[in-house]
Image (spheres, rainbow, N blue to C red):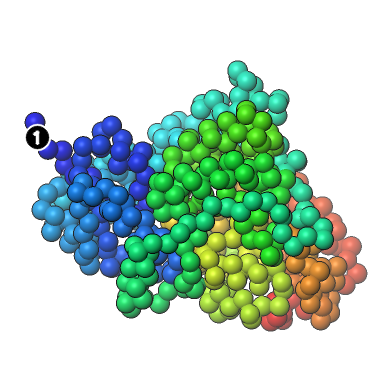
Amino acid sequence: MSTPAPLWLFADQLGPHIHGADHNVDREVVLVESRSALRRRAGHRQKAHLLLSGMRHLDDELGDRSAYLRADGYREALRELGRPVVVHEPSSRSAHDFVHRLVDEGLVAEVLPNPTFALSRADFEEWAGTNRRFVMENFYRSQRRRFSVLMDGDQPVGGSWNLDADNREPPPKRRRELGVPQPWWPTEDEIDDRVRADLDDLDVDWSGQDGPRLFAVTADEADRALRTFVDQRLDTFGPYEDAVMAADWPMSHSLLSVPLNLSLLDPLVVVHAAEQAYRDGASTLASTEGFIRQILGWREYVWHLYWHFDTDYVDRNELDAHTPLPDWFTQLDADAVTARCLSDALRGVRERGWVHHIPRLMILGSHALQRGYDPAELTRWFTANFVDGYEWVMPVNVVGMSQHADGGLMATKPYTSGGAYLNRMTDHCRDCDFDPKVRVGDDACPFTAGYWAFTHRHRDRLAANQRTRRAVSSMDRLADLEPLLEQEAHRETF
């Protein structure tokens, strides 16, 4: 019986449901540490640490089954190996094209399907059909039915598909922290020490700061992080999932995006663990449904739309936004920013490469939308600076959801707001030099004034949208609109 071809794993394909699957269990595993890929990717220092730590920990775990190759590039490493490999379909178009070139060169014998999402790409294309517009809620319901998650027969548990209305609590008053059990935190080891030393030796201009490893990079660590979240934190996740507290950045969030995007966790395992917590009475239905929607709904939706949309999707710019990202933004210079919410979000990116979805969408993204930052440049910024950011993750999240640059292909309105929303859903405004109620003057909130300037700039488009036409009517009644527009046209302080 012939020996099966080795299995080449990319750095985001590290889970046992990949290398330990029935068709892979007897294969030698090849891991390649590519210096050119690290230099080309650059980005946040802590993301590079997570990728290298994940690969090196898996190599250590697999022992003699693993061949760990260090080379300037992937092609050189595979030539050094001297045998054709099999590989699972990678998670980006650029890697996809590269892998298929290696097939033509005889270095890759077979490209297997990507096993890291619940729904296959073929099944999504069947669901999508010829649709030009996509509604995530419809996709999410089809996922619940297909995988029988939170279902009673053919109906959703509790009678409602979506319990968002129960999950919009502001941060608790007169408290600096949510007061829930801490997430699972990793303990660094000698492998992490060596990774840090090797990154120090690389001539790469990383963004962000080095810091302690905050996320799981092994299957065992990921399982412990999942169990800690489900057993101790899921129940309080839902009510406060959209709230932001300056002194409590994790709040009740799972911190599972990194191990999920390293494919250390099978998403259906994550979903079923949360569902079981509800059925055991350990979590409310609203919290459980809200979390499952993030994993089985939104995460899967973003993955499939990345492949479904045309390759030029990332260059869509329907709002004609061409302002370059300012230096303080690209350099993560939180100290150059006055607005507490914006400064805190930038500091979170600088110090750990992670903030949760509301700072991403309603602070960083909303600011960029109001100021007309170039969406393709912004997408590259998010991809580079977030430890869970990959080529497949950010285009739909940024171009579509955050910047409405796709003209409404996957979001029915632009997601932006004035300071009133931030004052309600964060605890930043009370200590800020800007006043969320003030539109004009030295203490005018840049989000409040920026919201009306954005509305004025796109008034025709917004007036034609039933979800935003009221904002245009409200803007037309502002007595100070002209001085506000003049102020925002020349604003340099945020």
Residue plotted at (36% across, 76% down):
200
Left or right: 261 in relation to 19: right
Please tell me in which quadrant of the rendered image residue 75 appears.
Answer: bottom left
Near-viewer residue (12 or 124): 12
Q: Position of residue 234 (x, y in %)?
A: 63, 43
**Residue 419 versus residue 339 in the image, above or below:** above
Query: x, y (%) of residue 202?
Result: 32, 75
**The quadrant where residue 417 appears:** bottom right
Q: Which residue occupies the foreground of this view, 192 or 151?
A: 192
**SS under mark 1:** loop
Q: Is residue 38 visible?
A: yes
Instruction: Report how many numbered discs are placed on residues in the image.
Output: 1
Going 66% across and 78% down the picture, which residue do you hit?
337
Residue 396 visible somewhere in the drawing: no
Query: Label 1: few (<14), some or many (≥20) within 10 Å?
Result: few
Q: Position of residue 270 (x, y in %)?
A: 51, 39
Please name the amino acid that badge 1 sits on: Ser
Residue at 22 percent across and 56 percent down: it is 68
Image-based side of 201 in relation to 403, left or right: left
Residue 278, compared with residue 165, is above or below; it is above
Q: Which residue, as the protein is rendered here, is positioned at the far top?
A: 153
Q: Which residue is mark 1?
A: 2
The quadrant the N terminus occupies is top left
The image position of residue 470, as x and y in percent, is 82, 52
Give me the residue at 34% from left, 73% from top. Answer: 197
For the C terminus, the quadrant is: bottom right
Residue farthest left in this picture:
1
186 lies above or below 150: below
Q: Which of 196/94 is in front?
A: 196
Q: Is residue 8 left or right of residue 452?
A: left
